[in-house]
Image (spheres, rainbow, N blue to C red):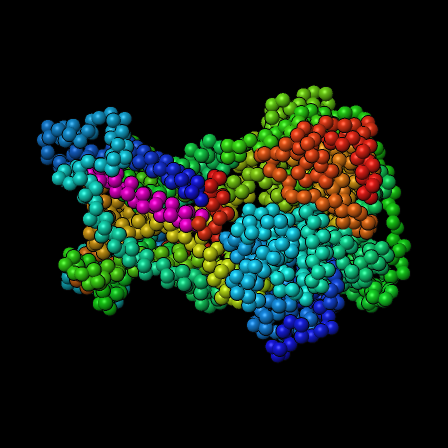
Amino acid sequence: MSDTATPSAPNVLVASMAERKTARRERWHLLRKRPGFIIGVFICGFWTVCAVLGDRITPYDPFTDRDGLSCGRAPCPPSSAHWFGTDKIGRDILSRVMMGARDLLMVAPVAAVLSVIFGTILGMVMGYYRGLVDNVLSRIVEAFLALPVVMVGLFILTLSKDSAVLDAISFGSRNVIIIYVVALLFTPIVARTVRSTVLGERDLDYVVSARLRGESSLFIMTREILPNITAPIIVELTVRIGYSIFTVATLSLLGVGLQRPSPDWGLAIAEGRDLLPADQWWPVTFPALAIATLVVGVNLIADSIQAVYER
Amino acid sequence: MSLTTSRPGSSIGALALDVDDLHLAYNVRGIPRPVLRGVSFHIEPGEAYGLVGESGCGKSTTAYAALRYMPRNGIITGGTIKVDGDDITSMNRSQLREFRVHKASMVYQDPGSALNPTIKIGKQLIESFTVLGQSGTEAEKSALEALRKVQIADPARVMGRYPHQLSGGMLQRVVIAMALACDPKLLVLDEPTTGLDATVEAEVLDLVRTLRNETGAAILLIAHNLGVIRSMCDRVGVMYAGKIVEEGEAQEVFDSPKHPYTMGLLRSLPRGGMHKSQSALATIPGTLPVLGSDLPTCVYIDRCPLADDTCRTVVPPVVQVAPGHTARCHHIDKVSEIAAVVPSTLREAGTDTVLEITGVSKTFRQAGHDIPALVGVDLSLTDGETLGLVGESGSGKSTLAKAILGVHAPDAGSSLTLDQHQLASKINKRSADDKRAMQIIFQNPDSALNASWTVRNILLRSVRKLTGKDKEAANARVAALADHLRLSPRHLDMKPRQLSGGLKQRVAIARAFAGDPRIVVCDEPTSALDVSVQAAILNLLAELQSEQRTSYVFISHDLGVVRYLADRIAVMYLGRIMEVATTADIFEGPNHPYTEALLSAVPSVDGEPRVRIRLDGEIPSPANPPSGCVFHPRCHRFIEGVCDVTEPPIVEVVVGHSIRCHIPPDELQRLQALDA
Amino acid sequence: MWRYVVKRVLFSLVTLWLLATIVFLMTWFLPSDSARLILGAQAPEASVAEFRIRNGLNDSFLTQYFRLMKGLITFDFGQSWKYPQYEVWEYLRTPLAKTAKIAVLALIITTPISIGAGLIAAKFRDRKTDRAIVLFGLAASSIPEFVTCALLMVGLGLKLGWLEPVYSTEAEKLSLFGQLRFLLIPALALALAYFGYIARMMRAGTIQALDSDYVRTASMKGLSGSQVMRSHVLRNAIAPTITVMSVQVGYLISGILGVEYIYNYPGFSRVLLDAATDGDLPVLQVAVLISALIYMVATLFADLFIAWLNPRARLELGSS
């Protein structure tokens, strides 16, 4: 009870103040007051705009323009004409960095969303039915958790180069295969989180009450329990987006993710690395900073959401 | 202040605790919200002082403030706290530490979380002595001695245990031993027995009483249970909204309260053998002012039946009623006029058998072991009847309820008949009508109501699912239900967390009654509520039953509540029914020795003198129950060679009163009369 | 406790078996043509067929499956397909040791610093020091290791010249201490990512312990702040940190792949990449299994350590 221990007493206040607003509006209000959230939204917003508008706002054509060769020998260092310099075949790095968000921001969040959807379904089934189903699935999930994501991604993506089946289900797009692979690898992780939350809910009295009025298991899972575990699922989603960007970027770096001529940052870093010993730092540095800002932005949002939802 | 004054024993004759005009606030998002608004009281050396009041009145905050412990956002905004003559509000960090080491200590509500789960009991206890400056070996000896003092039979063994390996009662003894390590001038006990069974509670209280006589420590006791306060304290303060509204000798305050709030509290308790058939419980209308809000002239004005214009304009003075007895009220002379009895108009229980259960057993399997939670339970229930189910935690009350409802399917061979037809054991095998016939009201409405649904949807879904009504008819039914349970239409569109505890429990009751059930299981429906709210809920349950002829299976650990509401009572121990009888017969006797012990354990707010029967040891594990009579290891009337060998027969004392005991009823009656 | 250890180890073995099965299924269903990849597009059909027979590629599903299982039990995985002169394990051992070098170096750097930072943050919670540590930790853990590594290569390597901007085989002629110049950049990149996880978890664990009822009891006894920290807070605060450290081992391995690749470090990632492009399945399978095994051993030790720290955890884990 609220009165029994002093440290919990302020919660009475918080709860009573919350009465005036719906929970959602309250959370939104709290989120907006967190500087980390604002900065995160700003960063992600910036990259989203770049990704959507792409070559319509870049100073040069990111793919074909060879203006950068004009400095003599590409790559040209940063200058007033090319703020970020040019790459080894003379393309403007600023333009390519701006454009580089597009594929990543298409692939990574979709993969995260898919993994959360499948993970939630799997986790709910495991947590709700428990018993044998859960025992077997839990072991499999645990086995998946032991697999390093990037390594398995590498494994699948290299070995699946000419699969007719994969081509068919991915509409011939490599990006779609990457989405499948990342979603597959993250699903068990999400499932484990959801399972443990469902375990905390399924024996609560409101579930017993639903069973007593004869609700089906499907109804109890989707209508009774699911609305009460949205907070951890949303937190999981934001966290997964961050990891998903990490995974896709690393796969691209290793040459099995996004493919040329995509201006993807991971690819650009891989290409620019060979120029480093010649003191040509810019082809690596700017895409690296781009990834860094994007993931920090995503994680600032994830962190704020977590803080507000798990209050 | 100099360090010298904070040495123990330096100020002989000083008050143990002297709180003067204490103001304390919690800082919430930068705004200080007052919680204590001028609390003043004192405790003489060796005296026991109790603080009572409902949740949110500030009693626990006061208790912690007495050791200057506050949550991170707490600030003392005015007043002084002196312990043994030293002002603790002005102490620096090291002085405060010295003070806590030597002069005051505390016993907490939840001993399970008050002890470090990763450290053995012994080490934690020894720490309390090394902090006094004792060497390791000295401290170990002192720790063993301290455990012996709190009547722990095997101190050496307990020292080697981790907290999770001990029961709540044992842990609380350990915490008490820790608190008494320094021979404190002031011992603060914050709800020390809440969450413990009545039998264990009685033992802990006995222990505190004994130790208090031995050590001479002054005691500040916080409890919501008025009976506990009365049985333990010399003087009592009644708190409301951060103020002490009445203070005086415990006996006097409880026997002739002078503040309308104290009066209201006492009248809302079912006491002195009250029964629903004679009178309804009094209730206090309204709710406690929101913590930290601005207060009117008199804190109680919104809920007071005596409030008039004077109350609205003039701050009530502290009136001296008798020497040492004060009340903060304009109308102390009118308090006794508040009507004492609210006549009851309830219909009596019928005679048609609704539910008949025979040989109901339930065995759980855990880690390869069979754990019989219920063993051959026979019970019946008539229309409009309330069957009270009592027993310590772990006695199988809730398991029985869930077995009846089909949540836990009972073992094969169990038989449940509802209105003369056999019930399927599992809920999902039961017909729609059978599901509709039996519903439940849970202890904690927070987990019983789906937090993400509105009240309307909660009720609507139950009505539609249970009665099969179409949407329009169901909506009408929800409106009628809400009206019946005094929920306003405004509440229907709220989510549970926007409602107070009492309102939430009303919603839960409305849901249980959505399909006009034949039987409702009430599993401790009021134990999470304050007494004034409890009274309203109990009245409501009684009314609904009388109107609809619903039968109740009423589980409670509060014998006062059971005695008030139940027509018959069944006493359970280790999954077995030990005694069943009408309420009158249970309280009349003769009783099963276990019932006898249970009854004697309840501290009464009326201060009836009672012989306490101590139960030795703890409730055994159901996994390997004792031989013969399962109660024999703890029984004070144990007969060697009989009770530990053969299972006792069920003996009928009078019609409808049976006892599972080897001792014949008239012999039991003789023995019990002898003891009383 | 022993009962728990045995149970926990048995569970790990089941997981390992499942893992091997998953890996096998992946190789079975993915359509790569190893023979063609290894022998090249120009190789005559006959030698391709011969390769298939020699390496059992034409065997049935079950035969191949049992071959892998047998290899797992006897720890004999046969030869690499691409370099038949090498046993798989032999082929992997040297690069694995190289990778271990930077991983261990990273852990040595990061563990004490991040635990300390977490404690400091908890102690000064909600103040500037705390905010700075939390923010830095968030950034450090969210930026992919290879990106950090790239930036360190530019900053510490190229611009400041303190460390070697890219690995070169010269390093192998030096003493271990001399090699540091070539190892620190990748190690630091890994250390930074780990710092974020550990420091933030340590902070959370410490705050949780500080807010607990048992710490309240301890300070009410009159113990001093440092006594409370030492005997009551640390023990309880470290458990979630250990868990996070072990679980993040999976990501550490993923991170190492990127870091090694960009730093041109001849470790595990290079063999792995080669094996992947060549379709050298035995090498690939064993590489994945070894990584998974490292993760499992890490979590196993973490669980055992926590069970040793907290007797209640022993109970919960033991019964599940």
- Residue B457 place in picture, x, y as percent: 64, 39
Of residues B99 and B666, the one nearer the viewer is: B666
- Looking at the image, can residue B187 be seen? yes
**Residue B361 in the figure: left or right of residue A197:** right
Q: Residue at x 33, y 54 (%)?
A: C144
**Residue C20 in the figure: left or right of residue B119:** left
Please, which residue is most extreme toward the top here? B421
Please say if B586 is above or below C117: above
Asked whether B392 falls inside the magenta stretch, the response is no
Question: What segment carries the magenta color?
Answer: C280-307
- Residue B599 place in picture, x, y as percent: 76, 42
Q: Residue at x 23, y 34 (%)?
A: C32
Asked whether C301 falls inside the magenta stretch, the response is yes
Q: Main secondary structure of the magenta part?
A: helix
Figure disc tally: 0
Residue B554 picture quarter: top right
**Residue A91 in the figure: left or right of residue B659:** left
Of residues A311 and C86, the one nearer the viewer is: C86
Please, which residue is most extreme toward the front here? B641
- Residue B90 place in picture, x, y as percent: 63, 74
Residue C73 picture quarter: top left
Residue C214 picture quarter: bottom right
For the C terminus of chain B, the quadrant is: top right
For the N terminus of chain B, the quadrant is: bottom right
